[in-house]
């Protein structure tokens, strides 16, 4: 009976690990597909264009129906910080695998 339970437990480990690795690979594929857009956003934020657009929005120069989440004071900054944290987390995971 111990052998049967061990095999069942390892089968569960295999199934869950397979699903997790597949999800991770899908997420990495998506990340690499979108990474150039992320880099463009960071450049937009860093080069001063974001500030000019933000100021124009504050001055009422932009259409009221324009989606403007990118102009919130925290959205891009929080994304950059979350991105850095995710990269750090991946580094930690990789270093624990060695």
Image (cartoon, rainbow, N blue to C red):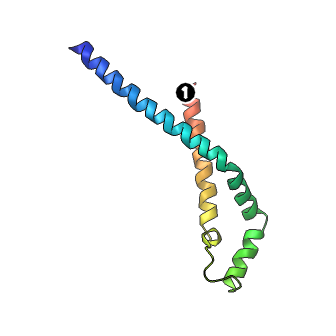
Picture coordinates of residue 16 (x, y %)? 40, 32
Q: Residue at x 25, y 19 (%)?
A: 5
As helix, strand or loop, the secondary structure at mark 1 comes to helix
Residue visible at 77% across and 69% down in the picture: 49
Residue 93, percent from left and from top: 55, 34
Q: Is residue 9 left or right of residue 44?
A: left
Left or right for 20, reference 98: left
Q: List x then y, in percent, for residue 25.
A: 55, 37
In the rendered image, which quarter is residue 69 located in? bottom right
Which quadrant is the N terminus positioned in? top left
Residue under numbered circle 1: 97
Name which residue lies at 45% across and 30% down. 18
Q: Tally the marks.
A: 1
Tell me which residue sits at (58%, 53%) in the image: 82
Most extreme residue toward the left is: 1
In this view, the residue in front, 65 or 56, is: 65
Farthest residue to the bottom: give it: 60
The spot of residue 26 in percent (x, y) is 55, 40
In the image, residue 63 above or below residue 87: below
Using the image, determine if residue 30 lies above or below residue 18. Answer: below
Tell which of 59 and 34 is nearer to you: 34
Closer to the camera, 30 or 88? Answer: 30
Quarter occupied by the C terminus: top right
21 is higher (above) or lower (below) than 38: above
Give the class, few, some or many, for how many residues have Cα within 10 Å of label 1's Cα (few <14, many ≥20).
few
Among the 4 quarters of the image, the one containing residue 40: bottom right
């Amino acid at each position: 009976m111990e052998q049967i339970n061990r095999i069942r437990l390892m089968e569960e480990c295999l199934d869950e690990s397979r699903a997790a690795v597949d999800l991770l690979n899908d997420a990495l594929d998506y990340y690499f597909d979108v990474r150039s857009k992320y880099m463009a956003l960071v450049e937009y934020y860093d080069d001063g264009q974001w500030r000019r657009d933000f100021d124009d929005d504050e001055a009422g120069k932009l259409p009221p129906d324009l989606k403007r989440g990118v102009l919130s004071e925290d959205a891009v900054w929080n994304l950059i910080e979350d991105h850095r944290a995710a990269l750090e987390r991946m580094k930690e995971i990789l270093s624990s695998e060695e």
